[in-house]
Amino acid sequence: MIREAEARDRDQLYRLYKSLVPNSKRMQVLEKQIETIRHDPNNLLLVYEEKGIIIGTLTLNICLQALHGMRPYGIIENIVVDEMHRSRGVGSELLQYVEEYCRSLNCRKIMLLSHSSRIEAHRFFEREGFNGTISRGFKKYLN
């Protein structure tokens, strides 16, 4: 089942995020922030839950722009599926949910970034219809 995350999901989200960025020393998953996202109409923190266990998650940000009239775009961040549950369609279901949601808002596109070393994830994103050759992503961390 896909649903929006709630504050009570903090520990399970932390576990998933830790598998995504195991060496992060700055990672903080705060109940207050989860609830802030839950009440923000331009942000979704989704979880995929099975029998009370969260096995996948992603964040979707809806971004407004002036270039294409009233058509926003979506940015997916922090998509992760528990290693023991990969190749079962969890990630695909999360991305399909996001695509349907973005279509309902008349979004022009959906974008995501993936660390350059995550080759298997890149293959997965390409199978899901994302094209990694159209644009080049850049990041600047602000500590």
Image (cartoon, rainbow, N blue to C red):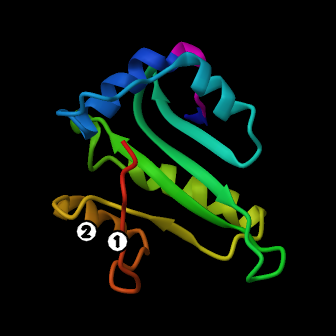
Q: Residue at x 73, y 82 (%)?
A: 67
Q: Nearer the viewer, residue 110 or 31?
A: 31
Residue 52 visible to the viewer: no
Instruction: Give the label on residue 127, or none.
Output: 1
**Residue 40 x/y as whole percent:** 74, 38
The span picked out in magenta is 4-8
Asked whether the beta carbons under mark 2 and mark 1 sit within 8 Å of each other, the answer is yes
Query: Against 88, is 96 above or below?
Result: below
Residue 99 visible to the viewer: yes
| Residue designated by label 2 | 123
Query: Against 27, is 72 above or below?
Result: below
Q: Quadrant of residue 20?
A: top left
**Residue 124 x/y as whole percent:** 30, 63
Q: Quadrant of residue 128?
A: bottom left
Q: What element does badge 1 sit on?
A: helix
Q: Residue at x 31, y 29 (%)?
A: 26
Q: What element does badge 2 sit on?
A: helix
* Amino acid on which disc 1 is placed: Arg
Q: Residue furthest right?
A: 70
10 is within the stretch colored magenta: no
Q: Residue at x 61, y 52 (%)?
A: 61
Q: Quadrant of the N terminus?
A: top right
